[in-house]
Image: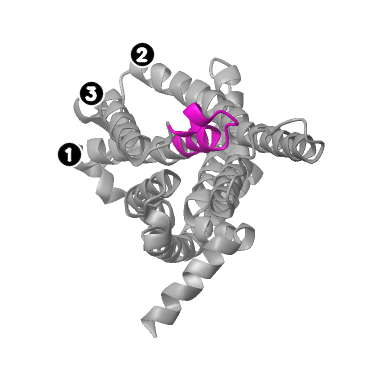
Amino acid sequence: MSSDLAYIAFLSSVQKYLFQYGGPILIAIGTFSCILSLAVFARKNLRNNPCSIYLIALNIANLLLIYTSILITVLVNGYNMYDLLTSLIFCRFYIYITVVSDILPPSYLILASIDRILITSPNAVTRRKSTRRLAYICIAAVTIFWVCAHSYNLVLIELIQIAPSYSICYLPQKLLEGQAYYSLTVKAIIVPAMMIVLGLYPIRNIRRVHRNRVAAVALSRSDTGGGDLYAINSKQMQLARITLSNIGVYLIFSLMISIVLMYQGITQYNDKTYLQTQIESFVLNVARFIDFIPFCVDLYTNIFVSKTFRNEMKNLFTLAN
C-alpha cells in the first residue's frame, strides 16, 4: 500500500512539472505560431484565396484554445490553482469553452480539405465552387453549430463539494455518459477518419489532373486534337501541402488521446483499484497535454513544407525592417 501511494505521488509530481514547465513553453510557442501565421495568411498574395480564409479561422481558433483551455489547464494542473473552479459561472465557462475550442480547429481543417478537393478537381465547374463567399458561409455555419451544440454546458454543469473548501465541476450521470460517448465517437473516430479521407482526396485529384495534362499534351503532339490543359498553380499546391501537413500533425499528436478515450469507453464499467484510477488519470492528462501540441506548431510545419509560406514570411519581415 505504501509503495502504491509513493508511486501515485511520483505520478502526481511528474504531471505537475509537465504542466508547470511545459505549459508556459507551449503557450509561448503557440502564441508566436498563431500570430505570425495570421500575419502571413492575411497578406495580399494569400488572403484572397478561400483556403487562406479557412487557415486564418484555424489560427484564430488555436489562439482561443491556447488562452482558454490550455491556459486554465496549465494553471490548475501545474500551479494547483483549483480555486478557479470553485465558481459555478467560471466552472461552466471552462467546460463549455474547452469543448468548443477543442472541436473548432479540426472542423476548420476539414473545411480547408474540402476546399482543396474542389480546387484540385479536374472538373472546371467543381473548381468554381471554391469561393471566398462559400468559405465565410461554411466557417459561420460550423462555428454556430458547435457553439449551439455544446451550450447545455452553460446550464447543466453544477458544483459538488467533495471536501471542505474544495469543489469540482459536476455533470449529471446521463450527460456525463453522453459526453464520454461524444468524445469517443467524434474526437477519437469521426474527426480523424474525416481528416484522413478528405486530406488524401486532393492528392488523388492532383494525380488525375497530372495524368489528364500528360494525355492532353500527347494528343496535341500527335495532331489528333487538343485536351484539357488545366494545371494546378503553385500557390494552390502549396496551400494543399500546408493543409495536409497540418492534418498530419493533428492526427499524430491526437493519436494518444484517441487511444485513451477508446480504452476508457471500453472499461468504463469495470471495477478498478485506486491505483488504476490514478494511473489512468495521469495517462489522460499527459495525453491531453500532447493533444494540445498541434494547436501550437502550425507555423513551424508550414515553414517546413511550403516555399510560398517561407517567402511570404520573409517578405513580411523585410517590410517590417
Callout 2 environment at 10 Å: few (<14), some (14 to 19), or many (20+)? few
- Could you tell which of marks 1 and 3 lies nearer the N-terminus? 1
- Mark-to-mark CA distance, 3 and 2: 11 Å
Q: Amino acid at mark 2?
A: Lys
Quadrant position of the N terminus in the picture:
top right
Q: Which mark is residue 174?
A: 2
Secondary structure under the numbered disc 1 in the rendered image: helix
In the image, residue 102 sits, relative to residue 192, either above or below, namely below
**Residue tagged by mark 3?**
156
Tell me whether circle 1 and circle 3 mark residues in contact (CB < 8 Å). no
Q: Amino acid at mark 3?
A: Leu
Question: Where's residue 258, x and y in %?
Answer: 58, 32
Residue drawn at x 21%, y 30% is 154
37 lies left or right of 279: left
Question: Where's residue 312, x and y in %?
Answer: 48, 67
In the image, residue 184 sits, relative to residue 280, either above or below, namely above
Callout 3 environment at 10 Å: few (<14), some (14 to 19), or many (20+)? few
Question: Where's residue 215, x and y in %?
Answer: 76, 34
**Residue tagged by mark 1?**
89
123 lies left or right of 27: right
Question: Where's residue 262, x and y in %?
Answer: 59, 25
Secondary structure under the numbered disc 2 in the rendered image: helix
Residue drawn at x 26%, y 30% is 144
Span of residues in magenta: 111-128
Residue 49 can be seen, yes or no: yes
- Mark-to-mark CA distance, 2 and 1: 21 Å
97 lies left or right of 216: left
